[in-house]
Amino acid sequence: MTTPTESTVLTALRAVRDPDQGQDIVSLGLVKELHVHDAEVSFTLAFAGQSPATKAALHSSASKAVSQVPGVSRVSVKMGSAAGAGRPQAPPAQGHAHGQPGAPAGDFIPEVKHTIAVSSGKGGVGKSTVTVNLSVALRQSGAAVGIIDSDVYGPDIPLMLGSRGRPGMFENRIIPVEAHGLKMMSIGLLVNEREPLVWRGPMIHSFIQQMLKDVMWGALDYLVFDMPPGTGDAQLSLSQVVPLSGVVMVTTPQEVALLDVRKAIGMFQKLNVPILGVVENMSYFVAPDTGMRYSIFGEGGGRRLAEEYGVPLLAQVPLDQDTRVAGDEGMPITLRRPDSPQAQTFRELAVAVQRRVVELAALRPLPTIG
Ligand SMILES: Nc1ncnc2c1ncn2[C@@H]1O[C@H](COP(=O)(O)OP(=O)(O)OP(=O)(O)O)[C@@H](O)[C@H]1O
Ligand SMILES: [Mg+2]
């Protein structure tokens, strides 16, 4: 295996130019405190008079450039000033809250137009796969999209988006990681992969709040939450802290999955969270050699569920080997094979979700006065 060195890292950083000064960041003396330890690289960008936009752009380009150096598995870039480079930055958990104490967290993301949760009662049905591909498809339609991986038990989104960078800090706020044109945050980016996560309800609550209050999301059309399986604390917390535009419920066609999903829909309804509709994943399998269609997990479950609750069946996604490989390799199928029927299904899902969000917003009763 290749081990990165200071020299290979600096060579990569020389490709990053300050757009205002037209020179690379190493020559400008912006790179300080470079440490290369095995596969982990950390350094500080000691900014002088750059605008906030330039600082954020340079931070993102520099972490990307270093993450592409062979052998690098983790990159941590601090933002400092020329005078105070190396001053310890507050770790994310101590980032101060912006806004009024006690204000609902929805108020902290005024620039986010729609918030969507992807949930299910059951594990392993494809929530994370739907989250990344729906988000990419929304992005491909021109929307600005962010993802919050709320699965504190098994954060899969960084892996599925092939994202290895660490989020940076700027003026005590967290800069989300960028992957394939999406902004993304995950507990997986903040803690060591090997550390066991013994998260309890109250901690999930504060994690979700922090993701809304302390992360610089900027203007987004959609912020998509990938939820952990079940009907537990994360679902409750999320619906309490954000006025969700709605939930996409993912299921497989068979009856045991439907039972759990019914429980989950019941919970969201009690919490007054609108159901955008149902995605039936792993609906069928088309044998590549014969073209024969097999209903491996049964048939019609998604449609029955949608009819039962009077919500749309948003998509039926086939079981497809490339979709699984794409997730494992960090390049979602919507990007890996944009011409595939699978990618087309996700684009149709994005259109259906967009339409439904608008429709539900129009249906929402106006607040009553007095
Ligand atoms: N349509 C599909 N075709 C093939 N493989 C799929 C499909 N959807 C999901 N998978 C694969 O199934 C596995 C589980 O999917 P995923 O991680 O998206 O489910 P999940 O509901 O998020 O799971 P968890 O409850 O553990 O968070 C992954 O390996 C994924 O690549
Ligand atoms: Mg998942």
Image (cartoon, rainbow, N blue to C red):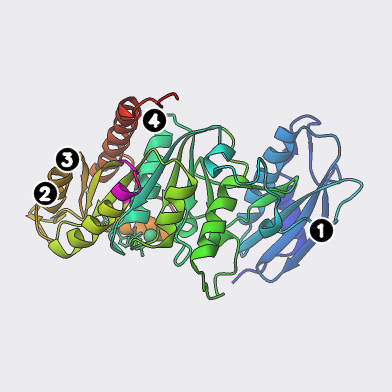
Answer with mark 2 or mark 3, whichever residue precedes in sequence.
2
Quadrant in which ligand 1 is drawn: bottom left
Question: Does dot 3 land on a helix, a strand or a loop?
Answer: loop
Q: Which residue is mark 1?
A: 88
Question: Does dot 1 land on a helix, a strand or a loop?
Answer: loop
Q: Which residue is mark 3?
A: 310
Q: Which residue is mark 2?
A: 304
Vertical comparison of 195 with 294: above or below: below
Left or right relative to 121: residue 152? right
Question: Percent position (x, y) of residue 63?
Answer: 66, 51
User: Mark 2 or 3, which is nearer the eye?
Assistant: 3
Q: Which residue is mark 4?
A: 141
Q: Amino acid at mark 4?
A: Ser
Q: Quadrant of the C terminus?
A: top left
Question: Does dot 2 land on a helix, a strand or a loop?
Answer: helix
In the displayed image of the protein, which residue is found farthest to the right? Answer: 83
Residue 264 at least partly seen: yes
Nearer-the-camera pick, 49 or 67: 49
User: Mark 3 or 4, which is nearer the eye?
Assistant: 3
Give the Cα separation between the discs numbered 1 and 2: 56 Å
Q: Amino acid at mark 2?
A: Arg
Give the Cα separation between the discs numbered 3 and 1: 54 Å
Give the Cα separation between the discs numbered 1 and 4: 41 Å
Residue at the (37%, 38%) spot, across then down: 137
Give neighbour class at mark 1: few <14, some 14-19, many 20+ (Cα, 10 Å): few
Answer with mark 2 or mark 4, whichever residue precedes in sequence.
4
In the displayed image of the protein, which residue is found farthest to the front? Answer: 370
Q: Quadrant of the N terminus?
A: bottom right
Left or right relative to 107: residue 237? left
Q: How many marks?
A: 4
